Image (cartoon, grey):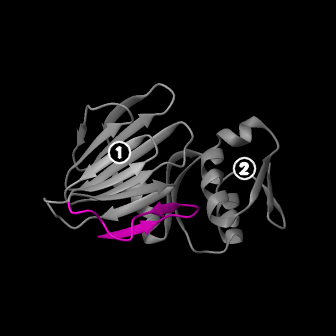
Amino acid sequence: TIVYLNSDSELRYPVNFSATSREVELRGEAFFEVVTDPQRPFVVNAEQVRVRVLGTSFNVNTYDKNYIETVLVKGRVGLQMEGNTQEWQIKPNELARYDRKNKTMEVKEVDTELFTAWIRGEFRFDNTSVEEIFTILQRWYHIDVFYTNDAVRREVFTGKLPRFENLQVILDLMENVSPLHFERKGNTIFIQ
């Protein structure tokens, strides 16, 4: 099994797995390519959601304080909410979004590329707000962000950016295609 961890993420696992299961704990975001072992299912405990896997490729994201998201690329997974025995099965190209506040699960079809581009060194955005984009950039580049007004937060972008480029390259690209202006002072970005 191969696990890719995104920035500011933590994976906990035992020194040896048990004879009946392979369980790990995730905080943050990870992409899993799990080797099939019907005798020992692979389980990801992602805060309030338990993802049970037999052999598959999928992404789990717990960054958002409101949701936990699981996107299935290949194979089959079942999800259980904390304290609930019902299991939601999702198919390839589906997203299961757990609402932490309402304790509900929503499943919908998605473009998995948007959720897994990070493992290929890319940022992918589809009608994504500046606030959402800079939440991601803050984790990756360890920066602080200040907005001059709420309208700036709501500007949206669609596109693909290289993940390992210098942050200034990304800021310059965004400035060239939008009315936004970025002022950088050390690790702080002011957006107007």
Q: Examine the structure image and report whether residue 122 is included in the region drawn in magenta.
A: no
For this rendering, which residue is in front, 3 or 153? 3
The residue identified by callout 2 is 179
Mark in the foreground, 2 or 1? 1
| Residue at horizontal 51 percent and vertical 28 percent from the top | 101
- Quadrant where the N terminus sits is bottom left
Q: CA distance from mark 2 to mark 1?
A: 43 Å
Tell me the tag on residue 111: none
Q: Residue at x 34, y 49 (%)?
A: 71
x 78%, y 55%: residue: 181
Question: Looking at the picture, which amino acid does disc 2 mark?
Answer: Pro
Sequence-first tag of 2 and 1 = 1
Secondary structure, mark 2, is loop
Out of 68 and 26, give the one closest to the viewer.
26
Q: Is residue 35 above or below residue 111?
A: below
Kind of residue indicated by mark 1: Arg
Tell me: 107 left or right of 171.
Answer: left
Residue farthest to the top, as pictured: 102
Q: Is residue 28 left or right of residue 72?
A: right
Query: What secondary structure is found at the residue carrying circle 1?
Result: strand
The extreme right residue here reads 185
Q: Which residue is mark 1?
A: 50
* Residue 112 in the image, given as x and y percentages of width and height: 34, 53
Residue 189 vs residue 1: left or right? right
The segment highlighted magenta reads 1-19
Q: Position of residue 163 (x, y in %)?
A: 55, 69
Query: Magenta segment, principal secondary structure?
Result: loop
Q: Depth check: give the residue in front, 123 or 182.
A: 123
Residue 85 visible to an observer of this rendering: yes
